[in-house]
């Protein structure tokens, strides 16, 4: 089992969910909305200075599904290179 976390700007949430559906991966997930933080793409604080916010998807899956998630997220990253889309995975 793998724990996969996808962290991205709210602006691409629908694109990522659609890409996961097309890949047939990530059918079972936990979604955290309105997530604040700072990463390599800059702060996302939901305030007047840094108005953007992120979301986080957490998915527990087998290796094959994790590979499909990576493909789906990679495709969205290619379409939206400036949106701060990250995927992380840890084995159980």
Image (cartoon, rainbow, N blue to C red):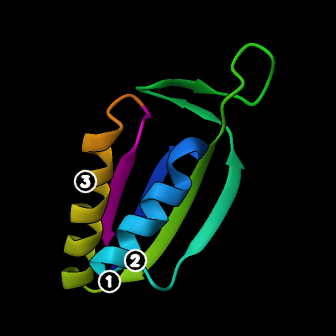
- Asked if residue 24 is positioned above or below residue 75 in the image, the reply reads below
- Asked if residue 5 is positioned above or below residue 42 in the image, the reply reads below
Q: Which residue is drawn at 75% across and 31% down?
A: 46
Which image quadrant: the C terminus? Answer: bottom left
> Are the residues at dot 2 and dot 1 in contact (C-beta closer than 8 Å)?
yes
> Are the residues at dot 2 and dot 3 in contact (C-beta closer than 8 Å)?
no
| Mark 1 secondary-structure assignment | loop
87 sits to left or right of 52? left
12 sits to left or right of 40? right
**Toward the viewer: 5 or 80?**
80
Q: Which residue is drawn at 28% across and 63% down?
A: 72
Q: What stretch is highlighted in magenta?
A: 83-92
- Asked if residue 32 is positioned above or below residue 48 in the image, the reply reads below
67 sits to left or right of 54? left
Please provide percent x and percent y for residue 73.
31, 57
Q: Which of marks 1 and 3 is nearer the N terminus?
A: 1
Which image quadrant: the N terminus? Answer: bottom left
**Distance (Cα) linking label 1 and label 3:** 14 Å
| Mark 2 secondary-structure assignment | helix
Q: Earlier in the sequence, mark 2 or mark 3?
A: 2
Q: Check residue 24 in the rendering and tell me which mark sits there, or answer none.
A: 1
- The answer to whether residue 92 of the structure is visible from this angle is no
- The answer to whether residue 89 of the structure is visible from this angle is yes
Q: Check residue 75 in the rendering and tell me which mark sits there, or answer none.
A: 3
**Distance (Cα) linking label 2 and label 3:** 13 Å
């Amino acid at each position: 089992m793998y724990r996969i976390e996808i962290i991205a700007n709210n602006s691409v949430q629908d694109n990522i969910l659609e890409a996961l559906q097309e890949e047939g991966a990530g059918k079972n997930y936990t979604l955290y909305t309105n997530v604040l933080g700072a990463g390599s793409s800059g702060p996302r604080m939901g305030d007047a200075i840094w108005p953007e916010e992120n979301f986080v998807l957490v998915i527990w899956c087998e290796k094959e599904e994790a590979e499909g998630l990576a493909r789906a997220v990679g495709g969205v990253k290619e379409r939206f290179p400036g949106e701060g889309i990250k995927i992380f995975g840890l084995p159980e």
